[in-house]
Image: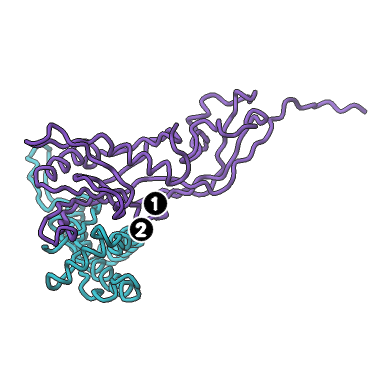
Chain colours: A purple, B cyan
Amino acid sequence: MARTGFLLAEDEALKKALSNIKVYDDREQERPVQVFFRYPEVETERTYPFITIEMIDLIHARNRQHSETELTYFNTAGGASAPANWQNRPDALTYWPSESADFSYLTNKNNFQVLHTNEFVPVDLVYQISTFTRTALHDRQLSSTILRKVFPFRKSSINIEADGTNRRLELLDWTTADLLDPEAGYRKRIFRKIYTLQMGAELPSSDIYGSKQVKSVTANIDY
Amino acid sequence: MGVQRLELWSAMTGFSSTYSPKGSDGIINGSFGVVDYVENLLNVYDKVLMEILHSTAEEAQTSMQEQARTSSTGWAEIADSISVKYNHENRQFSYTIVGDEETQERAMNLEYGNGHLAPTPFLRGTILQQQDKQTDSINSRLRKTLLENIGG
């Protein structure tokens, strides 16, 4: 089951995108590349190469902010009478950001025909992904895999399982930032590449609330 | 460690300074007043846009240096080394750290971390937060300057 919650769902999606990467060399047929959130603590045994994920900023995406409007979900399973193709309307509520693709977490969902909420606030999450290797060959292999397959230039997107959305994921910058390993007396080099990524996300601006549809209108007034 | 660049890609309006003759495939051809007017507008546009972008870079540099001076993360000590330039050929802003190797290494360690020091991404954070404001400012200055220039 996908991890849910703002930031948690996004973290998990990024980790998944970076999982199962392997590098190759003359000594080992394949070396799996570990993925950590933040740089591993001293107590954690580090096996090179490895990748770290750090969230470094959260910015209000004003270029995606609309005038505030109400989003609506027609719960047909709960007996709603829904307009045709309501899911395609701009005010359709079809997922709850980072939480759910179908609102099944609401245990009393079917008590209501219609769910409403205020429009979500668009934000951009900025991540730093760093790769650490001991050899130039592994560094090249990781760069190649990441730029070609994981976060391709100008074509990157990411699926967030928790809410079923496909988000924009832009590679803003990548740079070389090699280090000398202090644990090896600054004699061994650590090859490091840093990728700065920006992911679109949304934050609910109000709770979700349910209402019931009018079933009939009595137009005749007896007098 | 060399000078590091953080590049902000700007989606600029396309503009070409080269003109190709279209041939004489009409009943009458000529550079009528309206064409001269539009060519003048394009020339003014390019010049004005370049000036605005250079001044945007200068303002960004001043603003970033001021913000860095009030930072408690180590950026205060190298605030004056932050440089922002606009490169018209590549249509992008370059954010660099000028100074000796030690200053640049310090900036790299602050910006990206170094394993033991967590990143304090002042440059990237500020660049991203400035974008909307810069876009609004460029639009309004471009509109104002073009309106002043198209008359003559």
Chain for disc number 2: B
Question: Within the image, what quadrant is residue B98 found in?
Answer: bottom left
User: Local crowd at mark 2 within 10 Å, few (<14), some, or many (≥20)?
Assistant: some
Q: Secondary structure at mark 1?
A: helix
Type of the residue with mark 2 = Asp
Question: Within the image, what quadrant is residue B132 found in?
Answer: bottom left
Tell me the quarter of the image containing the C terminus of chain A: top right
- Do we see residue B144 in this rendering? yes
Looking at the image, how many numbered discs can be counted on the residues? Answer: 2
Give B141 or A139, whichever is nearer the viewer: A139
* In the image, residue A32 above or below residue B18: above
* In the image, residue A107 above or below residue A5: above
Give B129 or A180, whichever is nearer the viewer: A180
Give B42 or A123, whichever is nearer the viewer: A123
Disc 2, disc 1: CB below 8 Å?
yes
* In the image, residue A10 above or below residue A217: below
Q: Is residue A149 left or right of residue A138?
A: right
Which residue lies under the disc numbered 2? B132
Residue A152 location (% of width, % of height): 22, 39
Type of the residue with mark 1 = Asn
Residue at image location 60% in from the left, 23% down from the top = A77
View extreme (right): residue: A223
Q: Is residue A214 left or right of residue B127?
A: right
* Alpha carbons under labels 2 and 1: distance apart: 7 Å
Residue at image location 66% in from the left, 31% down from the top = A112
Q: Does label 1 lie on the same chain as label 2?
A: no
User: Local crowd at mark 1 within 10 Å, few (<14), some, or many (≥20)?
Assistant: few
Tell me the quarter of the image containing the N terminus of chain A: top left
Q: Secondary structure at mark 2?
A: helix
* In the image, residue B145 above or below residue A4: below
Residue A159 location (% of width, % of height): 36, 35
As drawn, the label of residue A63 is 1
